[in-house]
Amino acid sequence: MSATPVLVIHGGAGTISRAVFTPDKLLEYSQALRSVLLAGYSALLRGESALESAVRAVSAFEDCPLFNAGRGSVYTRQGTHEMDASLMDGASRAAGAVASVTNVKNPIQAARAVMEHSPHVLMVGQGAEAFLRERGIAFAPDEYFHTDFRLAQLKAVQAQAANQVSLDHDADPRQGPPAGTDKMAFSGGTGKMGTVGAVALDKKGRLAAATSTGGMTNKLPGRVGDSPIIGAGCYADDLTAISCTGTGEAFMRLCLARDLSLRMRYLGEDLEQAGQACLEALGELGGTGGFIALDRQGRAILPFNTEGMYRGLARSADDLQVAVHKENRALA
Ligand code: ASP
């Protein structure tokens, strides 16, 4: 089978307050999304696999401090960073994931190492880190993961209530930043994106999905969300590939990513119908967020129930489509 390659990405869903989202910020984020698309899509054009493309796109997100994954990860209640990531290859159903890892520069590459070089699917904490060091996966010092606006978010959330947790994208912008903090960086405008992810279809018709996150601001150390859970925040098989962002606990309780695929398999729904049902189920459970998904014909959906979702889609190198808010053009 020879398919036109497709790559879809997200940089998190949430409030993304228009009040502070200036044209300059829109430009900055749009450029960042385009360079992520380019990193992943050029791999597809070279004939590389969907898995390789998804890893490249998510690695590019992780290297960019604007997004809550890798370098830009949010802070836990103790002022540390604990990151989660997962990926799945639709053709082989091979999967790998890491959770609660610290100082790992590119958690998605760590998830790939678990998939390719261990007999396991999910590894966590210190055991995972020891394995990753043996595999030669890159680590970075604490300073690498420090961003002023995320520290400001932590302080603001803690000032509201010490035990409240906040989605990166949903901290209350009315609270305002602590003195001396960039209002834009602090608020829903840029400081609130959640997880990042990519789904890809390669020339051979194979699908893959990858998801990576710093989780939720002020989360308890040890808390793990949906992102590293295969079938919740990430899934791929021969029918579909999906990556999620939003209130992780709701995605986990719904096993949302796997539900999308099973609706197609057992109910015969198409991607659009299955996506609509999954988004409704998310809302019914009080969850907020969205997801990106592809089917094997290359059809794409990017639904969300929040004000916006950083997102992008490429079907050719000349047409890298990106959008942030709801009213932006629908990508397809
Ligand atoms: N789903 C992520 C988590 O619960 C957070 C997000 O996507 O904003 O860890």
Image: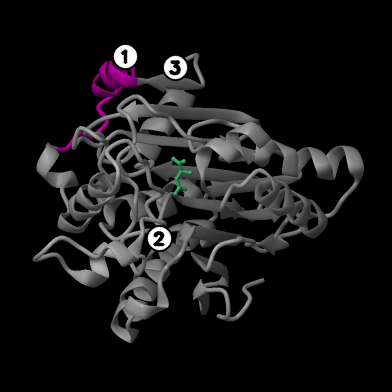
Q: Which residue is denoted by mark 2 in the rendering?
A: 39
Q: Position of residue 132 (x, y in %)?
A: 30, 23
Q: Position of residue 144 (x, y in %)?
A: 14, 46
Q: Secondary structure at mark 3?
A: loop
Callouts 1 and 2 close, C-beta under 8 Å: no
Residue at horizontal 33 percent and vertical 65 percent from the top: 173
* Image location of residue 267, percent across then percent down: 90, 42
Secondary structure beneath disc 1? Answer: helix
The answer to which of marks 2 and 3 sits earlier in the sequence is 2
* Tag 1: amino acid: Gly
Name the spot of residue 84 as percent of width and height, x first.
39, 35
Which one is in front, 161 or 116? 161
Which mark, residue 127?
1
Instruction: Say which of marks 3 and 1 sits in front.
Output: 1
User: Along the line of sight, which residue is nearer the eye, 133 or 225?
Assistant: 225
Q: Which residue does the numbered mark 3 point to in the structure image?
A: 118
* Alpha carbon separation for disc pair 3 and 1: 12 Å
